[in-house]
Image: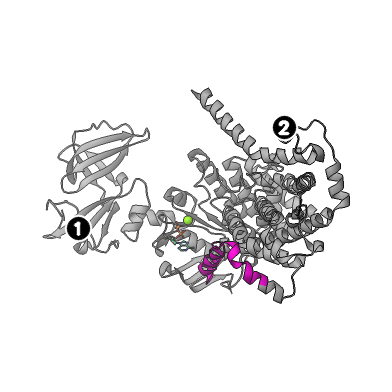
Amino acid sequence: MARIDIVDLCKRFGNIEVISNVNLSFEEGEFIVLVGPSGCGKSTLLRMIAGLESITKGDIIMNDQRVNDLPPRDRNIAMVFQSYALYPHMNVERNMGFSMEIKRTPPDTRRQHVDKAAAILGLGSLMERLPKALSGGQRQRVAMGRAIVRDPSAFLFDEPLSNLDAALRVEMRLEIARLHQRLGSTMVYVTHDQVEALTLADRIVVLDHGVVQQVGTPMELYESPANRFVARFIGSPTMNLIEVAMEDQQLTMKSTHSAIPLPALVGAESATQLGIRPEHLEPMPAGKGHVQGEVEVVERLGSDSFVYVQVPGAGRLLSRCNGNTRLQAGEAVGLSLDPAHLHLFDEKGQALR
Amino acid sequence: MRTVLTIGRNLAVLGYVLFALFPLYWLLKIAVTPDRLIYTEGTALWPTTFTFDNFRTVIFYSDFMVFFSNSVIVSLCSAALATLIAAAAGYSFSRFRFRGKSIIVVLMLVTQMFPLLMIITPIYKIVATLGLLNTLTSLIVVYTAFNIPFATFLMQSFFDGIPKDLDEAAMMDGCTRLQALRKVILPLTLPGLAATLGFVFTAAWSELLFALMLINSNDSMTFPVGLLTFVSKFSVDWGQMMAAGVLALLPSCLFFVFIQRYLVQGLTAGAVKG
Ligand SMILES: Nc1ncnc2c1ncn2[C@@H]1O[C@H](COP(=O)(O)OP(=O)(O)O)[C@@H](O)[C@H]1O
Ligand SMILES: [Mg+2]
């Protein structure tokens, strides 16, 4: 198991800075998820930890040893690639045992390790197959098996599920969570899917444009996002944002100057935007609640309904409410904002509370 | 409509195959025609009697076997050397960024632009100065050098077809870069290596210009030059020449039979998704 410290890490490709001054510490046995939109530098950061990408500036420290100049093979880290990267000319057994083959482990021992990993992943009957004769999910398992056989001090995953269909993705997500419980190894997992991040992570690192936006447990990020980017990125459907201003000690909608009758909020003076998650926006009979609008669309998902409400001055707001709501499109409706779950953002998008 | 298209396509293919194979057929036909019938039955599709005399004469009573083994040596060595160098160069072009890469690429393209006739004199001069005239070595060096650019691009495209993830996975699994190349990448490049070998081999096998200029002793003649010895001042020994030609086709055919199983595609299937 490994503790990984990342200190002032920078990466430049030519003149473009892809990773800017990243500082992170991953504890032993922690499941860390790096999440962010496509192109934000997640893979680059992961590959630097793996040793596949050179470091422009800063240090990576594993268990108190600086590993900047160690080649990948000396870092005792396993990586599962998005493309799986199975060796096409080797059968499943040899794919999984390849690392031990390189280390010249005796075939008996190798066999034992491979069988053990295969049993964990339910690959026992596929050992003789070539990768091309496997389904996507099976390839994914072999790629994980190859990592498990190594018994590495840390696992790195680069969007391992993004090539699978939705059902399989849920299944493999569970598998990875079980794997972590079973092995207890440090795992660093890259994804652009915030659902994967929320469900798998002990702690989430949110990246944008190579800059760490926030680090925290899933609930911390969900309940108190540090800025507008995190607020919008974490949580689905995304948080509603309303342009606001402070007029006469009263929070008002910026475009219509109509008041939002909320109790006094800390830091509201410099707020320019108010954020509220769909589940904290409750439909009320018309005339009641904090803002008034008209139902545009109701999406019924069974367990929940998504009610899109057009509010003059605030645009379209989304409320997530009971699956059996009676609301209909075109109806006038009030919306009540839960004061305990409001987020205020200043001009720069920083959260005010 | 579809059947019409299919028939049309098959006819076109048939036409092409006939057109391509007819000279070979004619080669074989003349080779087995007895000398006395060559002119009398000149245009018949098959002679009334046929004979292997021409083959016997060529193999046992001419220098043909010398030419033949010279050609085998030169072609095999050139093919092996050029492929080895092209594989190394192609790999580095495909996998690394380094200073001067684009300059090298342009230089290699430039070498392919000139007709060989233009540079044959300087080449002769160089080879003569090195004292390599009339040696097989000179041909091996020249053929290797002139085939490297194209062979390199060929190899590069094969390496480009293999995902970099595989190198990296192997390096994560404990390989050095060279081990990754040897154990993972090269086995996947076998079709590419075979194609490149075949390409250089055939190019060297049928090369005439340099062979003619750099060699003039019978001992070191390669086959295409040797064929010309069947042309004497007063006559051309058609039957023997064609018999020699038929024999000369054999190694190329054998070579392709040998490598064709590596030429099949799909060796990399299953490396990545899909
Ligand atoms: N080898 C490279 N050369 C130049 N730019 C690169 C290279 N690799 C990645 N980049 C750039 O770095 C940025 C981050 O890439 P990446 O880490 O792959 O993003 P992510 O995995 O978050 O989608 C992208 O803008 C990408 O274009
Ligand atoms: Mg990526």
Give ligand 1's quarter of the image.
bottom left
Name the amino acid type tagged 1: Ala
Residue B111 included in the magenta stretch of the image: yes
Residue ID for mark 2? B45
Which of the pair A40/B162 is nearer the observer? Answer: B162
Q: Residue at x 85, y 53 (%)?
A: B62
B150 shown above or below A319 = below
Disc 1 packing (10 Å; few <14; some 14–19; many ≥20): few
Image quadrant holding the C terminus of chain A, namely bottom left
Residue ID for mark 1? A264
Per the model, the C-alpha gap separating discs 2 and 1 is: 106 Å
Q: Is residue A27 visible?
A: no
Name the amino acid type tagged 2: Leu
SS label for mark 2: loop
The reply to whether discs 2 and 1 touch (Cβ–Cβ < 8 Å) is no
Q: Residue at x 42, y 58 (%)?
A: A39
The colour scheme used here is one colour
Q: Which stretch appears magenta?
A: B95-124
Which of the pair A291/B21 is nearer the observer? Answer: B21
> Dominant secondary structure of the magenta stretch?
helix
Q: Quadrant of residue B35?
A: top right
Q: Quadrant of residue A175?
A: top right
Report whether B119 appears left or right of A201.
Answer: right
